[in-house]
């Protein structure tokens, strides 16, 4: 019985294309999270400012929020497989550029901001293309929720291992090699994509004379007119805005509140967040249907708020670690569950646009929150900023949960 349940968790891997994607992404995402550790760590080393941490995070993610809606329209028009190959190649080049500046000792805050913004543009096209491509890799639609959950497990595994690898690399060879290894890791995912046997989808039928703006408007009307998808996106926006900034503030929180400037301490906290997220998404992968996921997203939103408040009262690293398990797990599971519901509910013709709006919801909230929470941290300290952000999460999730319940009541009546 236990073996059957364990095998059920991995059922999407029976599809060849998805197996290739899973293997390539598994390697690449560790490199991605090595860089996501390295950028805020180096930004804090260069500036010693919590506000600069928020600014760097804002500039890295705001391009995704601004461009993703338009990118979603184009992704619905383009071949998704080819789009992902191109975005991964450009992402590798961006990582090698970071490595060149770091290894030559010419890295500045301005350089981190510019190269982060370039990655944000790449992500605007990559995210909706990669997420919507899952449907083409998984032949059996019943395995789609499992495939989405396994994707999230890869992200969280990279999130857990990446900071540990990065902290070790910083000690042994310096921060520049974090970026270089990330660039090399893209070879795995590009190779897996090129090895796939993909049936090219016919071009999507479009209204004669339709423009990007008119199709974008159609996407917004569809998404925010959907009784289930709309409140889910609002709930995720609250979490990403006030909870998503926690990673950018961790260097300041570790140094100022926990009084530990060792990069290992930061790596441990980020690793704990990743472990919590991995446990959560494996739970999602073990589920056999999408039933009840709306309540899961609400529970995660409330847990995220409570966890951020508790960080204010953690006097030591080893007390903060178990709290980070809940914080990291709640945010990622809410994202993964919302992603699963959106992909399961959205019409195929609207999938790229709906997922791009999902990306905007998540990626615009995080940089905005980084600026807000970073400003609070500069004046009141990172621990107080976490407590206020957690309170905002609780209030926002309560409102979003009420809206969701009313929408479901209207649908069933």
Image (cartoon, rainbow, N blue to C red):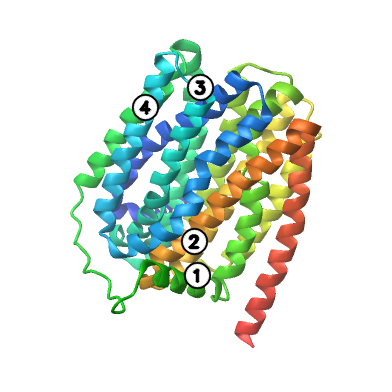
Side of 257 where 27 appears, left or right: left
Label 2 Cα neighbours within 10 Å, binned few <14 / some 14-19 / many ≥20: many
Mark 3 to mark 2 CA distance (whole Å): 32 Å
Placement of 327 over or under 206, stated as above or below: above
- Visible in this render: residue 331? yes
Give the residue number, with chain letter if any, for mark 2.
Answer: 357
Side of 356 where 188 appears, left or right: left
The x and y percentages for residue 55 are 60, 36
The x and y percentages for residue 331 are 60, 48
Mark 4 to mark 1 CA distance (whole Å): 36 Å
Secondary structure of residue under mark 1 = helix
The x and y percentages for residue 67 are 44, 53
Mark 4 to mark 2 CA distance (whole Å): 29 Å
Between tags 1 and 3, which lies in front? Answer: 3
Between tags 4 and 2, which lies in front? Answer: 4
Quadrant housing residue 328: top right
Front-most of 368 and 79?
Answer: 368
The x and y percentages for residue 302 are 71, 54
Quadrant housing residue 195: top left
The answer to whether mark 3 and mark 2 are in CB contact below 8 A is: no
Give the residue number, with chain letter if any, for mark 4.
Answer: 97
Q: Earlier in the sequence, mark 2 or mark 1?
A: 1
Give the residue number, with chain letter if any, for mark 3.
Answer: 108
> Residue 220, labelled with which disc?
1
Q: Residue at x 72, y 49 (%)?
A: 305
């Amino acid at each position: 019985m236990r073996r059957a349940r364990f095998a059920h968790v991995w059922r999407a891997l029976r599809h060849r294309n998805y197996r290739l994607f899973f293997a390539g992404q598994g390697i690449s995402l560790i490199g991605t999270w090595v860089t996501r550790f390295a950028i805020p760590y180096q930004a804090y080393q260069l500036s010693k400012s919590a506000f600069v941490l928020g600014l760097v995070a804002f500039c890295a993610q705001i391009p995704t929020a601004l461009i993703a809606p338009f990118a979603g329209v184009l992704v619905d028009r383009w071949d998704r497989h080819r789009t992902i190959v191109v975005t991964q190649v450009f992402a590798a080049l961006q990582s090698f550029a970071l490595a060149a500046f770091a290894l030559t000792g010419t890295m500045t805050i301005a350089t981190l901001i510019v190269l982060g913004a370039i990655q944000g543009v790449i992500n605007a096209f990559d995210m909706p293309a990669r997420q919507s491509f899952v449907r083409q890799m998984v032949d059996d639609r019943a395995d789609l929720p499992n495939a989405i959950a396994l994707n999230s497990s890869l992200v969280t595994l990279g999130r857990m291992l990446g900071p540990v690898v990065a902290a070790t690399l910083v000690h042994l060879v310096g921060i520049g090699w974090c970026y270089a290894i990330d660039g090399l890791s893209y070879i795995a995912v590009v190779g897996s994509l090129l090895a796939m046997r993909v049936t090219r989808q016919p071009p999507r039928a479009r209204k004669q004379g339709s423009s990007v703006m008119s199709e974008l408007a159609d996407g917004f009307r569809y998404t925010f007119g959907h009784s289930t998808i709309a409140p889910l996106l609002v709930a995720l926006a609250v979490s990403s805005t006030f909870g998503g900034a926690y990673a950018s503030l961790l260097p300041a929180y570790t140094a100022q509140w926990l009084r530990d400037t060792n990069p290992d301490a930061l790596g441990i906290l980020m690793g704990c967040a990743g472990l919590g997220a991995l446990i959560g998404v494996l739970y999602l992968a073990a589920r056999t249907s999408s039933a009840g996921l709306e309540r899961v997203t609400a529970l995660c939103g409330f847990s995220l708020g409570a966890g951020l408040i508790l960080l204010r009262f953690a006097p030591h690293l080893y007390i903060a670690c178990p709290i980070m398990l809940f914080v990291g797990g709640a945010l990622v599971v809410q994202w993964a569950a919302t992603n699963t519901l959106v992909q399961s509910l959205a019409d195929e013709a609207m999938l790229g646009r709906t997922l791009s709006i999902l990306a905007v919801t998540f990626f615009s909230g995080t940089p905005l929150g980084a600026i807000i929470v970073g400003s609070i941290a500069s004046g009141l300290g990172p621990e107080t900023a976490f407590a206020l952000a957690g309170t905002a999460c609780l209030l926002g999730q309560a409102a979003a949960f009420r809206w969701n319940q009313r929408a479901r009541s209207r649908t069933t009546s």
